[in-house]
Amino acid sequence: MHVGERIAARRRRQGMSQDALAGLVGRSRSWLSQVERGLRGVDRLSTLRDLAVALRCEVADLIDSERLITPTGSSRMKALDALRSQLSAYGEMFAEPSTPWPLPQLRNAVVLVNHEYQAARYERAAAMLPEILGAADAYYDGSAGRAGRGVHLARCMAYVVTAKLLTKVGEAHLAWLAADRATHAAVAAESTAAEGMAAYQVACALLLVDGADAAELLAVRAAEGLMTDATSDSPDLVSLSGALWLLAAVIAARRSDRPIAIERLVHAERLGELLGRDANHAWTAFGPTNVAVHRASSHAELGDPRAVLRAAADIDPESFPVGLNGRRSRIYLDLAWAQTQARNDLEAILHLKRAESVAPEVLRFDSVAQGLVRDLLKRARRPSAALTTMATRAGILN
């Protein structure tokens, strides 16, 4: 039995309804129904713990033995230790004073590392960030003079992209730390756009630490706040508000609230129409195509593979501006998920290959991609050469 079947069997043994169990773990009946039917997985250990407590059993009783022996490791990012050391050093308090980079150099470095991240060159971005953060923090003693606002904006951008990378590789608490520092820099810069960028990353980090309610509240509040000034003359604010609505839509879909998810997608769609084209203002990759990709992702969160396939049929990933490889690969991951749910494993592997061809590092560091490869491995009686090779490249098999 898969995990959902085990949950259903224990629930029935306890004489408990789906409504009752869903209420005990803070989820909807629709979510639990999808889990029990195998349409979606339980991807958080904390949720498995809650289910085990409600069902009066151990977590191990809910996890099939096949899952226990499936490799779950992923490729380790070589530069992550250096980045962690930089974030935890607090050099502005105890280290010897260092000479800050000229502000134009710092700005250019932040632009370059953002390009590396969006191109899905995650290793290179991670290798660049410790030095960039050190240079940004060298200004932290308050001696920025008349360039103060520009320095705060540069620091905000440096910590925003750091939070993005750490979220991508699943370093939840470090991502939260980086996003929090971005927030402080944004407030110091007195920049609405910077505050929107920082808020987005805080919400993403909160999702990783099981703070979905707080993440949703923050995303909605920030999106609504930005909409008051989002006009055709302010593409950054339009894009940031739209990106936040998209994030809020995915969060609503994750808790199986279809009407709210659709309502938020409509907000984002209107902002995409106001923007008028696919763009990358404020490093959001926001535009009509990104709205369409998030619509497919929302269907995936709702556990509706057929709707994912229908939504994806009208999406052209090449519509994204040049360089947005990570965003371009997302639609292929959603398609791989949909085909995995439909038990079309060969199609799923094909879509994963397409995602990897667009963004070669995505299988090594993206948690969704890693989960899909593991799921395909678990149920393959004899994994094909293509799947085995892919799992090896992903760092899941030695």
Image: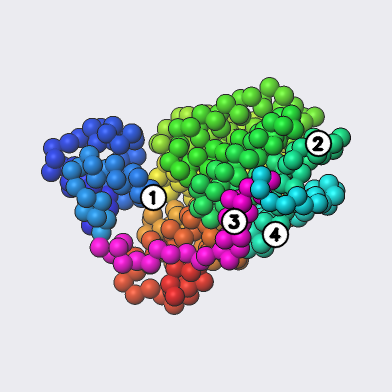
Residue at image mark 1: 43
Q: What is the secondary structure assignment of the residue under circle 4?
A: helix
Quadrant (top left, top right, bottom left, bottom right) of the C terminus: bottom left
Query: Magenta stretch: residue 104 in it?
Result: no
Quadrant (top left, top right, bottom left, bottom right) of the N terminus: bottom left
Mark 1 residue type:
Asp
Q: Residue at x 80, y 29 (%)?
A: 233
* Residue 315 x, y percent position in the rendering: 60, 49
Residue at image mark 4: 128
State the residue in front, 382 or 20.
20
The residue positioned farthest toward the bottom in the image shown: 385
Chain part drawn in magenta? 65-92
Q: Is residue 256 above or below residue 114?
A: above
Q: Tag 1 or tag 2, which sits nearer the N-term?
A: 1
Mark 4 residue type:
Met
* Residue 154 x, y percent position in the rendering: 76, 43
